[in-house]
Image: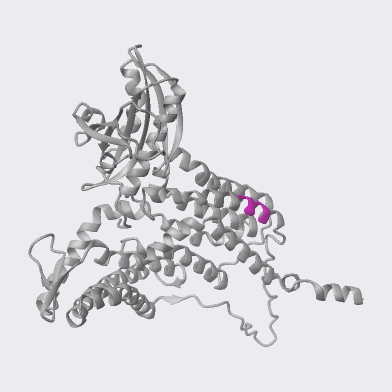
């Protein structure tokens, strides 16, 4: 007895706690699973969180994982519908393992197949909810996954393309409405003078004997705050009881309130600039005013829930039911035992899947060379042609119109020629022959799939001798082709496609580097790939920084 008591006392506290408390064991398991997800997707989550401090329309996307975690905790604590006591581990594995496998494949294989478009469309944020769903199914059972289906699906709202597709059509209109409202308010409260030139977003503020100009850009026009409240409101709908039409009315009026408060925030910044100068208005008040006003708006709408006949679900009642005299009290409803009592093997599977995802995530920092945190490219349409390569000079050959039939009437095709010059660094690739650069720009990405480079060679009856792929850095995966021109000479081509920013919005480019094959085709291909890496690196370092969406 003494030996058994001593052994039990010497066991770690968490083991003794878990043995004696089933809820404690489940809580410990939940902490472990959460930690695995955070470590596995640390880079993806960090890019979302970094947007909270940026002036972008999607600034509040970083709140989505935190809100999802709070939803899970809330749904587990608040009362729900009775759950059937189902214990089918075969079903758990049939659901959980495929979800984990798909999540791992997306982040490990996707970048190699999709090149820079993987980060443009942020498919890592599609992998995250799939991984979480698989983890819940394996570690807690498919019954628990069904109960937590809303918080898991809520993670999909962190996927930036959902909003960029919407904002591309409505952002300018929303900004124009905000500017029109500001102009009307300034007629009543003359805190700033709207400037007549430009797009109406410039305002002059007088401070003392001087004046300065502030710009109300799209990110400052309130769209980020309205979108943030939309995310919070959708989450709140899962924890609120009441008619659906009243929930929708509460959500719409909340977005209107947030927008009105954001107008007041802008006026306060104007007033602070007039009283204490530009430095105080922009460096002291501006960084915190948005978060303060947003928090006040959310708090006001939560306090207003009873006005809309909406109530937050309360905790499970622990008051025993009153039984009439002489009546037989109904037996207490048995608490369903956990579907997964032991999760050793599931946690091993999750750890292996998480390690694979973590390795893939560690390499995603390369996308930062050419893209912003939330996906949009930093490369502009003219950047690649204007990038300087050490030891080379570039000259314009001309522009062609014969590609408009294939790539669209607004597409462009420009050709440049890199000429080798004096070596400036020893890192310069070793080829000495001129390199032709073709830049095809279009708004129709599907045209690149319909008319490939290989199709062009086959059309001109240029036999293709070899094909392969190469990683050029920055997430760019290029194709290499060795082909013959009219059976006289051999050429080597390296080409890739990537998204670019233009004055018309998001466009796409096909970049093709060509040179005559000198020596063996393998040597020529190696040299041209090395040169292509320099082009990508120079383009990335000369692309403008920023996180505007």
The main secondary structure of the magenta stretch is: helix
Residue at 51% across, 66% down: 69
Instruction: Specify the quadrant of the image occupied by residue 408.
Output: top left
Please state which of residues 396 and 291 is positioned toward the viewer in this rendering.
396
The correct choice, above or below, for 201 with respect to 119 in the image is below
Place of residue 538 in the rendered image (x, y in percent of width and height, measured from the top left): 34, 44
- As for residue 359 lying within the magenta part, the answer is no
Which segment is the magenta one? Answer: 347-353
Q: Quadrant of the N terminus?
A: bottom right
Establish if 411 lies above or below 484. below
* Residue 125 at x, y percent in the picture: 45, 53
Q: Residue at x 63, y 85 (%)?
A: 322
Q: Quadrant of the C terminus?
A: bottom left
Q: Is residue 330 left or right of residue 172?
A: right
Left or right of residue 261: residue 197: left
At 47% from the left and 63% from the top, the residue drawn is 65
Residue 245 sits in which quadrant? bottom left
Seen in the image, is 456 located left or right of residue 152? Answer: left
The vertical placement of 327 against 76, above or below, is: below
- Please provide percent x and percent y for residue 500: 30, 44
465 and 36: which is toward the camera: 465
Q: Residue furthest left?
A: 196
| Residue toward you, 461 or 543 | 543
- Give the image quarter of residue 32: bottom right
């Amino acid at each position: 007895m003494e030996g058994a008591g001593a052994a039990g006392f010497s066991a770690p506290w968490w083991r003794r706690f878990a043995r004696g408390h089933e809820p404690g064991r489940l809580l410990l398991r939940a902490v472990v699973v959460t930690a695995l997800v955070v470590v596995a997707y640390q880079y993806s989550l960090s890019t979302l969180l970094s947007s909270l401090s940026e002036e972008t329309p999607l600034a509040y996307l970083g709140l989505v994982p935190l809100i999802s975690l709070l939803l899970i905790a809330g749904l587990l604590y608040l009362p729900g519908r009775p759950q059937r006591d189902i214990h089918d581990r075969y079903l758990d594995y049939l659901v959980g393992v495929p979800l984990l496998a798909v999540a791992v494949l997306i982040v490990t294989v996707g970048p190699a197949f999709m090149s820079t478009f993987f980060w443009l469309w942020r498919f890592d944020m599609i992998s995250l909810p799939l991984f979480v769903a698989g983890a819940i199914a394996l570690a807690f059972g498919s019954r628990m996954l069904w109960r937590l289906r809303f918080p898991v699906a809520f993670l999909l709202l962190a996927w930036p393309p959902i909003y960029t597709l919407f904002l591309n059509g409505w952002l300018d209109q929303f900004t124009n409405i905000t500017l029109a409202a500001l102009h009307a308010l300034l007629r009543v409260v003359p805190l700033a003078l709207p400037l007549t030139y430009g797009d109406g977003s410039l305002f002059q503020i007088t401070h003392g004997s001087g004046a300065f100009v502030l710009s109300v850009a799209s990110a400052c026009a309130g769209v980020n705050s309205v979108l943030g409240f939309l995310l919070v409101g959708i989450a709140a709908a899962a924890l609120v009881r009441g008619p659906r039409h009243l929930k929708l009315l509460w959500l719409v009026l909340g977005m209107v309130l947030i927008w009105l408060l954001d107008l007041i925030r802008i006026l306060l910044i104007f007033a602070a600039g007039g009283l204490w100068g530009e430095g105080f208005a922009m460096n002291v008040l501006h960084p915190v005013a948005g978060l303060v006003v947003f928090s006040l708006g959310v708090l006001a709408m939560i306090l207003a829930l009873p006005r809309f006949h909406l109530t937050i679900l309360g905790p499970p009642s622990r008051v025993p039911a009153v039984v009439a005299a002489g009546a037989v009290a109904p037996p207490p409803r048995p608490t369903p035992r956990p579907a997964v009592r032991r999760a050793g093997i599931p946690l091993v599977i999750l750890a292996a899947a998480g390690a694979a995802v973590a390795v893939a995530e560690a390499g995603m920092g390369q996308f930062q060379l050419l893209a912003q945190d939330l996906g949009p490219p930093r490369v502009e349409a003219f950047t690649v042609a204007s990038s300087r390569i050490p030891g080379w000079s570039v000259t314009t050959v001309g522009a062609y119109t014969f590609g408009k039939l294939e790539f669209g009437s607004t597409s462009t095709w420009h050709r440049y020629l890199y000429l080798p010059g004096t070596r400036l660094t020893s890192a310069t690739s070793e080829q000495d022959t001129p390199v032709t650069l073709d830049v095809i720009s279009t708004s129709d990405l599907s045209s690149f799939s319909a008319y490939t480079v290989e199709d062009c060679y086959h059309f001109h009856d240029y036999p293709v001798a070899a094909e392969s792929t190469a990683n050029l850095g920055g997430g760019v995966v290029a194709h290499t082709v060795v082909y013959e021109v009219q059976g006289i000479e051999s050429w080597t081509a390296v080409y890739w496609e990537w998204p670019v920013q233009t004055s018309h919005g998001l466009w796409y480019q096909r970049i093709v580097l060509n040179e005559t094959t000198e020596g063996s085709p393998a040597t020529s291909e190696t040299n041209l790939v090395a040169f292509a890496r320099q082009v990508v690196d120079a383009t990335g370092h000369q692309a403008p920084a920023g996180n505007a969406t």
